[in-house]
């Protein structure tokens, strides 16, 4: 017998409450107590706890998927969105940004997907060919902190994006495994010339690694130890 307002436990999304019969036969409408999201699920899934809250903060405790798919035609944009969230809010991410944030509505992939085609510079063909990336720096070159949003971002060619990031870097000192020292400012160029990865150098400069492939990296106002 169906008991309205009955509370059921889910396996991964806290408690949910049965509101009423669903729109389809054999379905129940439930409300997730943590988020307030309401959705229809099969009865057996409800009582086994195998139901999923699409509006839970499942990406590093910040990002919300929403009522959209993350696979198929949305997969590449989902990866862009997920990387953006992780780089801003996951301190263990190799490419973590300090003092860079995501506008509140873009923390939900469903909203990001609605906006991203209207961001300046969007070109579906170039995106599918991985030739353009979402840039936050061009429109905010002298602003701190920076924010990802429809108004502050632009799609740019990948090489242009790397050049902008390098231009905003301070001079750094690189010490090779055999003790040679270099003073540089362009991380991308240095990585290419020495067979290293740009993101690994950046992570080392920001103290997430002590070294990378035996190389030490510090900004010029710091002493290599």
Image (cartoon, rainbow, N blue to C red):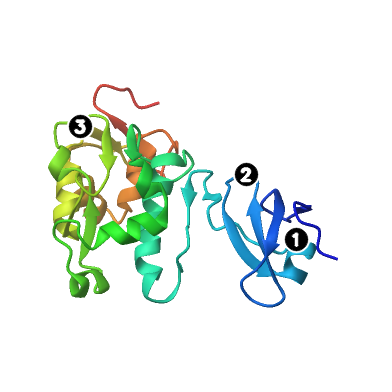
Mark 1 nearby-residue class (10 Å; few <14, some 14–19, many ≥20): some
Which quadrant of the figure contains the N terminus?
A: bottom right
Q: Which residue is mark 2?
A: 34
What is the x, y in percent for residue 179? 33, 37
Image quadrant where residue 202 sits: top left
Secondary structure found at label 2: loop
In front of the other: 69 or 188: 69
| Contact between labelled residues 1 and 2, with CB atoms less than 8 Å apart | no
Q: Nearer the viewer, mark 3 or mark 1?
A: 1
Q: Residue at x 73, y 55 (%)?
A: 10
- In 3D space, how far apart are the residues under numbered discs 2 and 1 (Cα atoms)? 15 Å
Q: Residue at x 31, y 60 (%)?
A: 114
Mark 3 nearby-residue class (10 Å; few <14, some 14–19, many ≥20): some
Earlier sequence position, callout 3 versus callout 1: 1
Task: Judge whether 167 appears above or below 82 on screen.
Answer: above
Q: Nearer the viewer, mark 2 or mark 3?
A: 2
Image quadrant where residue 71 sits: bottom left
Q: Residue at x 26, y 46 (%)?
A: 149
Question: How many numbered discs sit on the rendered protein?
Answer: 3
**113 sits to left or right of 155:** right
Q: Which residue is mark 1?
A: 49
Mark 2 nearby-residue class (10 Å; few <14, some 14–19, many ≥20): few
What is the x, y in percent for residue 26? 72, 75
Q: Residue at x 44, y 40 (%)?
A: 89
Secondary structure found at label 3: loop
Secondary structure found at label 1: loop
- In 3D space, how far apart are the residues under numbered discs 3 and 1 (Cα atoms)? 52 Å
Earlier sequence position, callout 2 versus callout 1: 2
Q: Which residue is mark 3?
A: 170
In front of the other: 55 or 208: 55
Task: Judge whether 35 appears above or below 1 on screen.
Answer: above
């Amino acid at each position: 017998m169906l008991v309205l307002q009955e509370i059921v436990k889910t396996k991964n999304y806290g408690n949910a409450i049965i509101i009423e019969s669903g729109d389809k036969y054999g379905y129940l409408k439930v409300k997730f107590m943590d988020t307030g999201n309401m959705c229809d699920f099969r009865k057996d899934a409800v009582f086994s706890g195998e139901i999923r809250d699409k509006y839970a903060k499942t990406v590093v405790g910040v990002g919300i998927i929403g009522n959209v798919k993350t696979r198929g035609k949305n997969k590449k944009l989902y990866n862009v969105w997920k990387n953006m969230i992780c780089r801003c809010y996951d301190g263990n991410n190799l490419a973590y940004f300090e003092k860079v944030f995501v506008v509140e509505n873009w923390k939900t992939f469903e909203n990001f997907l609605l906006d991203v085609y209207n961001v300046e510079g969007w070109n579906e063909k170039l995106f599918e060919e991985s030739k353009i990336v979402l840039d936050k720096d061009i429109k905010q070159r002298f602003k701190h902190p920076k924010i990802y949003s429809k108004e502050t971002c632009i799609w740019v060619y990948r090489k242009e994006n790397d050049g902008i990031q390098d231009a905003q870097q301070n001079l750094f000192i690189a010490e090779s495994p055999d003790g040679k020292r270099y003073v540089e400012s362009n991380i991308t160029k240095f990585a290419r010339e020495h067979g290293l990865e740009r993101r690994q150098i950046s992570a080392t400069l920001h103290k997430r690694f002590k070294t990378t492939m035996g190389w030490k990296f510090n900004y010029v106002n710091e002493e290599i130890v």
